[in-house]
Amino acid sequence: MPADQATVLLIEDTRSLAELYRAYLRDAPWRFVHVGTAAEARAFLAREPVEAVLLDLQLPDAQGLDVLRELRARRPAPEVIVITAHGSVATAVAAMQAGASDFLVKPFPRERLVVTIANALERRRLARELAELRRAADRTTFAGFIGAAPAMQAVYRIIENAAASRATVFITGESGTGKELAAEAIHRLSPRRDKPFVAINCAAIPRDLMESEMFGHVRGAFTGAVADRAGAASQADGGTLFLDEVCELDLALQGKLLRFIQTGTFQRVGSTKTEQVDVRFVCATNKDPLEEVRAGRFREDLYYRLHVIPITMPPLRERAEDILLIAEAFLARFAAEEKKAFRGFSAEAKAALLSYPWPGNVRELENAIRTAVVLHDGDLLEASMLPAQVIRPGRTRTTALPPRAPAGEDLATLIRPLAEVEREAIERAIALCGGNIAKAAAHLGVSPSTIYRKRAAWTGEAPSLPDVAE
């Protein structure tokens, strides 16, 4: 019997009818099992699950509707098709209210039975897929990641699907987006999870040492090689080898890596002995690999060997809905580590976090929260506790002075009153932020209360400060 073949259980005390239904389903793609009583059905269901049940309402040891309710209370519940010779409307309504998928009145033709079971099993499949999609869409964490944005849900699905394979995965994305975390997740979810995960940062190792780092060396292979040393290829045998910043590899070493990927064999530096290992490759880069190929810095044949299952890690600015979710997780973790009392962010701090573009992505956000926690204390982390570039993005840039006014030029037409410039800047910021004063204040580097007071002064009304920031 195929592993994915559905089991259809018939609960019918009349053997002749049971044999008739068995004949009806002889050519159907389902496994058919018959029991004659409710007790026998309970015993069978205790041993193995079923996808659909054909239930006769007239049983010798139980009321059919009671058995129906038992079946629908199971988890997972099978689809139940009620069969009865008493086809009254009241019986049909009671069965459907108790959870029956469909209703058959004896006698019925073979085609009606086959179609009814097929429809019930299709409903079950669609319900299962819908539940899985809802579960996936509701995920806010996954294998070390934090994030519920659609872009991250897509990453989660690719990781889940790729993990079981041995195909090479090529991860791209800006620095700080979690490329190594994705590689680790692929390994942890794979059949190789109990074997080593070995990572090499191809940009951090000098070129003349990279081959030894990857393949190992024998004693005397070069100055300083005082003993044999196993490289990452040997260490990762049976597991996963992660090549971070793979586009930084020297072209000569790219050729040796290509042969290693193709054959699974390599030679240590200074050795003539060929070694063979079983390694799953995952690589990553913060560059555009195709641009590196076009520029002649990365071998095209190696690119296509590595670029089998692509994963693109989205930058934090493209999943703004995750910023506070991630920041709150970091705050809880670092507050516990540093034994600080922080329990959340103020409204102004949240606005500042949401307004900043985070060019360093999650890594920069992590560092910002860690710095604030280490240097400050309190119940709420205030905007003023965040690093300066987060509170006042772009303020560190220098601005060139304008040229001196030509002789005879009226300065009154060149210089506007500061109050007028300030009001225009505040109103423009509020408009650009969609009326969100807290967000506008974060961009302007002032508190929301300052904006409320200034606007009240312009209108002559008493300042109206909200209980919570917009």
Image: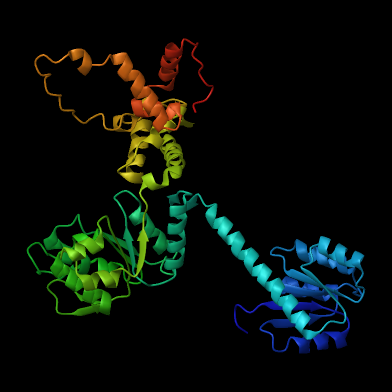
Relative to 395, 162 lies left or right: right
- On the image, which quarter does residue 195 sit in? bottom left
Q: Residue at 73% across / 69% down in the picture?
A: 79
- Toward the left, the furthest residue is 223
Check the image and report above or below for 197 versus 10. Answer: above
Q: Mark yes or no: residue 109 visible.
A: yes
Q: Image point 33% across, 56% down: which residue?
A: 180
Left or right, 209 with reference to 127 = left
Coordinates of residue 402 in the picture (x, y in percent):
15, 24
Q: Is residue 242 above or below residue 342?
A: below
Q: Quadrant of residue 324?
A: top left
Q: Nearer the viewer, residue 249 or 334?
A: 249
Residue 53 x/y as whole percent: 76, 74
Residue 46 at x, y percent in the picture? 74, 71
Q: Quadrant of the N terminus?
A: bottom right
Horizontal side, residue 114 vs residue 160: left or right = right
Query: Which corner quadrant of the image does residue 132 belong to?
Result: bottom right
Looking at the picture, tell me which residue is in the foreground, 465 or 183. 465
Residue at the image point whose x is 47% and y is 55% from the top? 153
